[in-house]
Every structure is written in structure tokens, then in C-alpha cells.
Amino acid sequence: MATFEVVSLVPSTPDRVWAVLADVDRWVEWAPTVTGVTALGSSGLRVGAQYRLVQPKLQPAVWTVDALEPGRSFSWVSASPGMRTLAFHLVEPVEGGTRLTLRIELSGAMAWLGGWLGGATIRSYMQQEAEALARRVAT
């Protein structure tokens, strides 16, 4: 398994951070790492919801929400041959604003290769997303 994590302090309320993070349909408006989002089925973040994400340098992927704690966290999974990717998003109140945790876990027979080949891109994208989210909630 390969795990990547970014934790950042966002100087805004958890409610505001969550509102932007949970509105997956609008990620293309603020996340430079997402160039396309399509809800497969009805839109709205809920367990079982599926989204097709298009990101630079990556193959388009279908993500299925597998866990949701409204106002606090969600995770979703995507599978490709030999690898399963879990992306976890957590919003927590802290002094001075909100702690945002973004984590990617790669598992399966090809996880080591995915982490080795894609680790730098994964880290960069997660950092860019955290910074862009902070800018978005500041407006």
C-alpha cells in the first residue's frame, strides 16, 4: 500500500470549507487539478454516488462515494486493473479555522508501482487542491 497525505490549516469556518468541498459538481471552478466532473446519476454527495473526474496527466476515473459524515468527511474509491485508490477528505474545527486533511491510499498488486510512478503528481495535486480550496473559501 502507498499512502499520501496533506494536512493544512484553512482560515475559514468548517461549515464554509465543507460547503465548497462537498459540492463536487463545482470543483472545476476552483481546483486546478480537476478539468471535468460529471455526476453519473443524480447529483449530490451521498454514499453510492458516482462521479467521473478528468484530471491533467491522469486517465479519467469513476469515483464512488463509500463513506460520508455530512459536515465532516467523505471518502470515495476508484479502481483500475491491479489497483484500488481511496481518497479521503476530512474537515475539522481548530483554533484559527479549519484543519483540512486530504489522503490518498493506493492498494492492490500494482499499488507500489502507482505510488512510485505517480507519487510526485499525487502529492502535488493534493497540495494544489488544499491551497485552492483555502483561496476559494476566502472569497
Image (spheres, helix red, strand yellow):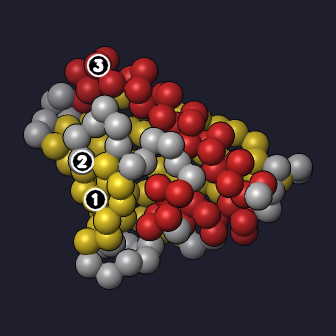
> In x, y percent, where is residue 138?
78, 54
* Res 117 label: 3
CA gap between label 1 and label 3 equals 22 Å
Question: Pointer 3: residues within 10 angstroms few (<14), some, or many (20+)?
Answer: few
User: Where does the image place residue 133, in percent across and percent down from the top left?
Assistant: 64, 50
**Mark 3 vs 2, N-terminal side:** 2
Q: From this viewpoint, which residue is outermost toward the top? A: 116
127 or 102, which lies in front? 127
Does the CB distance between marks 3 and 2 fall below 8 Å? no
**Does label 2 or label 1 sit earlier along the sequence?**
1
In the picture of the structure, the residue carrying the numbered disc 1 is: 52
> Disc 2 marks which amino acid?
Pro
In the image: residue 62, left or right of residue 87 = left
Q: CA distance from mark 2 to mark 1?
A: 7 Å
**Which image quarter is the C terminus in?**
bottom right
| Mark 1 neighbour density, 10 Å: few (under 14) some (14–19) many (20 or more) | some
* Residue under the image location 37 percent in, 73 percent down: 47
- Disc 3 is placed on an element classified as helix
Residue 84 sits above or below residue 122 on the image: below
Q: Which residue is mark 2?
A: 60
Q: Quadrant of residue 67?
A: bottom left
Taking the image as shown, residue 85 lies to the left or right of residue 101, namely left
Residue at 16% from the left image edge and 30% from the top image edge: 109
